[in-house]
Image: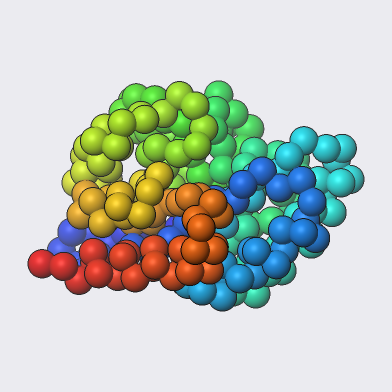
Amino acid sequence: MMASRPKQAEARPAPRLYLITPQVAEANGFAGQLADALAAADVAAVLLRLAAADERTLINRVKELAPLVQDKDAALLLDGLLSLVARAGADGAHVSDIADLGAALELLKPDRIVGAGSLVTRHDAMLAAEAGVDYVMFGGPAAGQPSEFSAIADRIAWWSEVFELPCIGYAATREEIAPLVAAGADFVALDYVWADPRGVAAALADAAERLQRAEIAP
């Protein structure tokens, strides 16, 4: 899912969607929404964000939701919670503090995915890549990242020109999908679909269509 993009002489793989969940406090109630979303569009990965709870409750939430994601050949990543990844059956973790990358890589690689977000500077992004992460994310719901869309797009354009490691661009709205693809994002992350008045399935299907149109645009 997070393989490096080919060298520039080869065709660039089509960008894919990366779905970020809201804070999930009750897995059973959220499962239907998640299933509807994954049935509506191709999704490469789901970043599962969990509301605070005791360890056993967190593991049970992941175990309930993981099959919905993995049966669609998508990767289930936990937002942090490194020690729970293997025990809960997740495919990896997304790390939002560069200080935690070393521990994440030591604990989870090479069998599982480790992604890096909240990369405030270009230097942080390069350090994460050199450390061995599977992707870097620019923008996102976590604090401390570039918040202006123009800054996110500029960071992605720079990264895609220089590095082969996949990059993810965060789209706060559906209108930001096409510009992220144009900038060179390998994946487009989004979470606005959960609050879309059309419903999550319709919103995600629309996002997938916008992604495809942006990819084939001259």
Q: Residue at x 44, y 51 (%)?
A: 189
Q: Nearer the viewer, residue 215 or 195?
A: 195
Residue 130 placement (x, y as % from top left): 40, 36
Residue 55 placement (x, y as % from top left): 85, 40
Q: Would you say residue 212 is visible in this rendering?
A: yes
Q: Is residue 137 above or below residue 68?
A: above
Which of the 4 image quarters holds residue 38? bottom right
Q: Nearer the viewer, residue 166 or 56?
A: 56
Q: Would you say residue 107 is visible in this rendering?
A: no
Q: Is residue 211 above or below residue 49?
A: below
Which of the 4 image quarters holds residue 97? top right
Q: Residue at x 77, y 59 (%)?
A: 29
Location of the C terminus by quadrant is bottom left
Q: Nearer the viewer, residue 118 or 103?
A: 118
Q: Is residue 155 left or right of residue 60?
A: left
Q: Residue at x 84, y 54 (%)?
A: 60
Q: Is residue 70 left or right of residue 152?
A: right
Q: Residue at x 50, y 55 (%)?
A: 196
Q: Is residue 114 above or below residue 16?
A: above
